Amino acid sequence: MRSTQQLFDLTGKTALITGGSRGLGLQMAFALGEMGAKVAISARKAEELAQACELLAAKGIEAHALVADLSDAEQANALAEQAMAKLGQIDILVNNAGASWGAPAEDYPLEAWDKVMNLNVRAIFLLSQAVGKLSMIPRRSGRIINVASIAGLAGNRPGTMQAVAYNTSKAAVINFTRTLAGEWGQYGITVNALAPGFFPSKMTKGVLASLGEEKLAASAPLKRIGDDEDLKGATVLFASDAGKHITGQVLAVDGGVSAVGG
C-alpha cells in the first residue's frame, strides 16, 4: 500500500494546462510542477508564455510554452499534437482557458455569445477529444480537470454581474464533465471540474473593481476571496492517484459562497 505522499506524487507525469500563462492556469501549472510533473502551458501570447516558463523554471519545473488560440477550432488538434511532441504523452489535461463578456441579456451581442461559448465550451470538448484519442484512451489512463465556476451553479444576484453567456457556458462545462466521466471511465480516465469563486485575475479585475473586493469577501463564510494558493491542493487531488476513485465531480473552491447561496 502506497503512502499518502506517494499517492499525491506526480513524478514522471506530464500535464497540459490551457490558459497557463497567468492567473489560475499558472497557479495550477505550479501545483502540478511542484509535485513532479513536466508541464506544457498554452496561451495566445508568446511573450506571456515565455515569462511564465521562466517563473516555473526558477522553481525547478520543466515547462514548455505552446502558443494556441483555442477560439479557433483547428488549433485544438494542433495543440494536442504539439503537446504530445513536447511531452511524449499527456497524463493530465487542465482545460482552463476561458473568456467572459458583460452585457445585459436583452442586448447581449451574438458575437460575444459565440466568443464565450466557443472558447469556454467548444474548445474544451475539442481538446479533450483530441487528447483522449492521441494519448489517454490508447493508454487506458488519464486525468482531465475542467475549470468551471460557481457562476455555473446559479444565476447572478440583481445589480451584480450581467454575464449570461459566461454563466451558461460554465453550467455546460459542469455537465460536460459529468457526461464525459460517464463515457470515459471505462478507459481509466477521470474527469472532474473545479468551480472557483472570485480570485484576482485579469478576467475578474473589472468585476472586483465595480463590486468591491471587500463586499465580495463579506459574502463568503470565510470572509475572503481566493488567492494564489487556493486551487493548488484541489488540482493535485484530481490530477494524482490520491483522486483515482473520484470522477464526474465538481468541487467549489469559493470560501463557502455556494454553500450559503451567495
Image (spheres, rainbow, N blue to C red):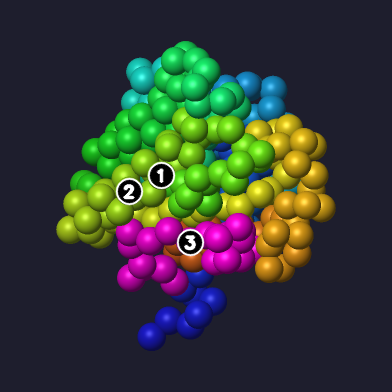
248 is within the stretch colored magenta: yes
Amino acid identity at mark 2? Asn
- Mark 1 lies on residue: 171
Of tags 3 and 1, the one toward the viewer is 1
Q: From the viewer's perspective, is 58 left or right of 169?
A: right
Amino acid identity at mark 3? Leu
- Mark 3 lies on residue: 251
Q: Marks 2/3: CA distance?
A: 13 Å
Pointer 2 local density, CA inside 10 Å: few below 14, some 14–19, many at least 20: some
Q: Return the x and y of residue 53 as percentages of the image width and height.
A: 67, 37
**Residue 44, above or below 210:** above
Q: Determine which of the numbered discs, if any, sits on residue 192 in the image.
A: none
206 is within the stretch colored magenta: no
**Looking at the image, which residue is at 38% across and 49% down?**
174
Amino acid identity at mark 1? Ala
Highlighted magenta segment, given as a residue range: 241-262
**Looking at the image, which residue is at 73% across and 32% down?**
206
Q: Return the x and y of residue 69 as percentages of the image width and height.
A: 49, 21
Q: How many marks?
A: 3
